[in-house]
Amino acid sequence: MNKTSMQLQPQRAAVIGAGIAGAACAVSLQRAGMQVTVFDKSRGVGGRMSTRRASWTDVSGAEQTSEFDHGTQHFAAKHPRFLSVLKRAISVGCVAEWQPQVHAVWPGATAINSFVAVPHMPALTRHLLAGLPMHMGEQVQRLQRTADGWHLVVQGGETVGPFDHVMLALPPAQAAVLLAGHHDDWANNLTAVPMQACWTLMAITQDLDWPWDACEPANGPLAWVARNDRKPGREVPLGHASWVAHASADWSVAHLEDDSSAVLQALKAALARELPGCEKSGAQINWLHSSAHRWRYAQPTLLSRDECWWDATQNLGVCGDFMGAGNVEAAWRSGDELADTIAALMDDEADTRKVQDTASA
Ligand SMILES: Cc1cc2nc3c(=O)[nH]c(=O)nc-3n(C[C@H](O)[C@H](O)[C@H](O)COP(=O)(O)OP(=O)(O)OC[C@H]3O[C@@H](n4cnc5c(N)ncnc54)[C@H](O)[C@@H]3O)c2cc1C
């Protein structure tokens, strides 16, 4: 092999985690000329930008299926690069602006500017990752580094590799497991990142006289209530309403190990108290579907000031929402920044090689 063909070999990168951070990192690395493969333990992409599906029977007795955004509700975007990604996503119909009327501090109302993926939250990540090779439903259990590069040991014991670079786009605790023995200082820092828990109620009722798209209750178990069917691209059959309610972090922690049926009853009672139209008219709530989901690790509370970590001696990187504000935009920026850091180093190396080649010619 001559020098030129060696230089043309694309670098192989494994991105572990197909949430928004992993998607941002993977597409930018691919754009930089790398051969990228994405791994995720779930069957679907999106991570905590996720959706739950439920079957239920409507008031006329017909079988229905609905989806609930049970993780991320909506997201903000300030960074020009993230905004331009969203602009493209809007143009192909997988993201929409959402300006909900939010009942924040009763009786005042506020309007906020934000975005949602359409028709459900994983759609943005799926759009970004389109065309990239992906190993879904494969939990990476261990990383091995040998002379030819990185190998990933996946659930079942199979080994995949080699890769020149490995990027971890995982929540802190999961990243720490894979970093142990390779970067113990990072692993220790990540093990110490506290994560908020969140109990989530998903429900379908008859349509109720509720003027808001969302509300942020000041007291009680709930911190957020949204009419899921009033978000762009979501709907329920006429005469019905679809709800997602998040318990506050304090309440969720206090009830973390409670039986889920007891939690469900408590959250339904709390949601009923947030529906003043219903209270005033004395209307009974007809619960056509209700379920509760426990997020043990919803959002990080202690955040790194760095945007990403990259160790050029091992070709090992880390990104995720704990690098920044602990939300969707922070996760996207961290993944994009990690890819940028590597691409810039690759450019520097290519320039150095060119200078050396010219000097030796
Ligand atoms: C209830 C809730 C409400 C939220 N509300 C909002 C909101 O309104 N606005 C907002 O901006 N943010 C919100 N967030 C936060 C937001 O969802 C996250 O900040 C963001 O989605 C994190 O993206 P990420 O790519 O860093 O991680 P994740 O989305 O967690 O992606 C990590 C991926 O790694 C995979 N994985 C983990 N371990 C392994 C392994 N060993 N091998 C292979 N794959 C693995 C997981 O399956 C997952 O797909 C909310 C989160 C929750 C849970």
Image: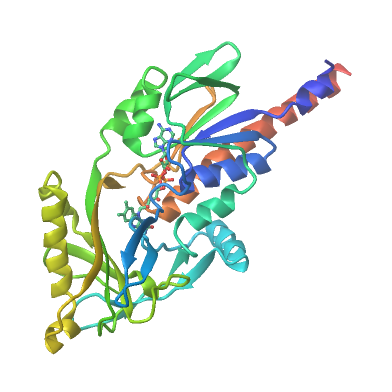
Q: Is residue 60 above or below residue 161?
A: below
- 160 left or right of 352 in image: left
**70 and 187: which is toward the camera:** 70
- Residue 53 place in picture, x, y as percent: 38, 57
Work out which residue is located at the far right of the displayed protein and give it: 361
Q: Nearer the viewer, residue 251 or 356?
A: 251
**100 in relation to 69, above or below:** below
Q: Position of residue 207 (x, y in %)?
A: 29, 80
What residue is shown at x 31% (from left), y 75% (from top)? 241
- Tell me the quarter of the picture where residue 179 sits: top left
Residue at x 62% of width, y 35% of height: 36
Q: Residue pushed farthest top?
A: 147
Question: How is colour applied across the structure in the image?
Answer: rainbow
Q: Nearer the viewer, residue 13 or 43?
A: 43
Count of labels in the image: 0
Q: Specify whether residue 336 is in view.
A: no
Most distant residue in the front direction: 61
Q: Is residue 72 left or right of residue 97?
A: left
Is residue 176 left or right of 281 when viewed as pictured? right
Report if residue 172 is visible in the image. Answer: yes
The image position of residue 344, as x and y in percent, is 63, 37
Residue at 47% across, 54% down: 122
Is 12 situated above or below 254?
A: above
From this viewpoint, which residue is outermost toward the bottom?
281
Q: Quadrant of the C terminus?
A: top right
Check the picture and name the quadrant holding the N terminus: top right
Residue 128 x/y as whole percent? 58, 51
Location of residue 289 (image quadrant): bottom left
Give above or below for 237 relative to 17. Answer: below
Q: Which residue is located at x 37 percent, y 67 percent?
A: 63
